[in-house]
Amino acid sequence: MLILENTAEVIIIGGGIIGCATAYYLAKKSISVIVLEGSECIGNAGSSRNGGGVRQSGRDPRELPMVMWGIKNLWPNLSEELGVDVEYTQKGNLRLGKTQAHLKMLQGLTDSAVKCGLDVKMINGDEVRKINPYLSSEVIGASWCPTDGHANPLTATLAYYKKARELGVQFITGETVIDLKKIKGKIRKVITQDNIYEGEKVLVASGYDSRDITATVGIDIPMQAIKMECLVTEAEPYMFDQMLGTAEADFYGHQTKHGSFVFGGSTGLEGYNKDNGKLVSSSLGASCTCRGIMRYFPALSDAKIVRAWAGYIDECADKIPVISSIEEVPGLYVACGFTGHGFGIAPAAAYNIAEMMSDGTPTVDMTAFRYDRFKAKL
Amino acid sequence: MSKVNNRSRNIGEFISEDEDDMLICRCEEITKGEIRKAVHEGMYTITEIRRYLRCGMGLCQGQTCARLVKGIVAKELGISPGNLEPATSRVPMRPVEMKILGNEQRGC
C-alpha cells in the first residue's frame, strides 16, 4: 500500500506555479501525478514573490510565441476554469523611458516584437499621459502594448494547486528532494530525506534548486540565484489599470484589485547582496524602489508602504528558461531558469510541458528552450 | 517532528457552522467560514491562507487576527495551534509613507 501511494505516472519536483499548473494540465489528461514541494508552503518562492506582470512586450523574441499563445488562449478564462479569482486584468503595459538612451532601448525591443507579430508601438510623453495621467513630465516616451496586463500571482498559483488537488493530484510539502536515480537507463526514483517516490516521468521545476537536483544525474543548467525585492502599499483609491515597467528597471508594478500598489525594483547591487542564503529584505531595497516610483508618480509619495519582501530569481545564462526533455536521461524533463519573468508565461509553459510529457508534441515550438543550447564562447 | 505534509490526507468534509459569518480579519473583512473553507480547499498553512484570502495582509498586518486565524486553521486540521508556523513578519513595523521611507538624507 505504501509503495502504491509513492508511485505515480509523473513525479513533479517543485510546487510553484509551473509545478502546480503542469500537474493540473496532466491531471486533465487523466495522468496520475505526485507533486513534491521542498518548503512547507505551495508557491513559496518566485511564484508568490513576483510583481504579477502578464506581459509580452519587453521580452526576448524567443519567448514571444509561447507567451502570446498563453495570453490569447489561457489567461482570459483562467479564473473561471480554476474557480478562483486570479484577478487577470488585460489593460495594457507601458514600458517607460526618461532619456533618449531609454527610448532607443525600448525601440529595439519594440521592433523585434513587431517582427513576431505583437501589437506594440512607441508613443510619446503626451500620449503616455493620455493613457495614464498620473505619470510625471520626466517620462518622454514609452512602448505601449494594449494586450499586456497583470494578475495576482498568489491566487493564480494557489488556484492551480487547488484545482489540481481536486482532480486527484497528490501534493506533499516539506519533501526536499536530494537525489534522482535511473533504473535500466531511464529515470525512475526521486529520493527525499525520508521517502522514495517512483514515476515513469519526472519534471524538475524547482527554480534555482533545479540545478542541484539535475546535477545528481549529471545535467547542469547554467543559472544563478539573484535576490530581488518587492513592496506593497496600503489600499489606495483607484488610479489606473495598466502594468508598468521602465526601460531601466527602476521599478515595475501595478495597482491591484483591492487597491494596493505592488511594485518591484532593483538597487543595482543585486548579485552582490550579503544575504548569507537568508531571504530577507535589505536596508537599501524598499527605499530605493520608493525613490524610483516617486520620480514617475509624484502623487504616490504619501502612499504608505505596509510590507516589503524578497525573492530569488533563477537567472539563466541567456535570460530565457530551460523547458526541455533531457536526452541523456529518458523520462526526465526540466522547466526552470525563468529569469524573473516567469509568472505571465507560466500557464502557457505548463500547458506545453504537459503536452510534451503526455503526447510528445507541444502546441508551441519549444526548441528555443532546449537544455543543451549553452556553449562556451570559444 | 517531520515536516512532511500530505495535502491529500482526509480532514473530513466542510460542514457549515453558525459562526461562519463572523468577521475574523477586520482589515480585509474575511469571515470564519471563508477561512475554514480555504483549509478544505487545500490551504494547510497560515502563509497559504494569507495568500489565498488576504487575511492578515491589511493595515494591521495580522497583528489583531493572527492568533484567531491560527486557532481556526488548527482546529480544522485537527492539530495543535503550536504545530502551525506563523506567517513571516515583514518590514516595515508600521506603515510608512514613500516620501519618508525613500528619504535617506540626515536631518530632513
Image (tube, coloured by chain):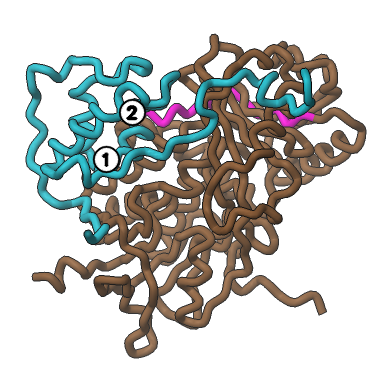
Q: Are marks 1 and 2 in contact (CB under 8 Å)?
A: yes
Question: Which residue is pictured at 78% across the width and 28% down the height?
Answer: A142
> In the image, A18: left or right of A110?
left
Mark 1 is on which residue type?
Met
Residue A302: give x, y in percent of width and height.
64, 13
Indicate whether A268 appears above or below A360. above
Q: Is residue B36 above or below residue A258?
A: below
Q: Please report, as a chain letter, where disc 2 is located.
A: B
Asked whether the viewer can see residue A266, the reply is yes
Identity, as a three-letter code, of the amino acid under mark 2: Leu
x then y, percent, for residue A278: 52, 53
Q: Nearer the viewer, residue A256 or A167?
A: A256
- Bounds of the magenta span? A85-96
Shade representing chain A? brown
Q: Is residue A218 magenta?
A: no
- The residue where tag 1 is placed is B43
What residue is at 70 percent from the left and 15 percent from the top?
Answer: A132
Crowd class of label 2 (few under 14; some 14 to 19; many from 20; radius 10 Å): many
Chain B tint as drawn: cyan
Q: What residue did someone put label 2 on?
A: B53
In the depicted view, which residue is nearer to us: A101 or B37?
A: B37
State the residue at coordinates (27%, 61%). A34
The quarter of the picture where residue A222 lies is bottom right
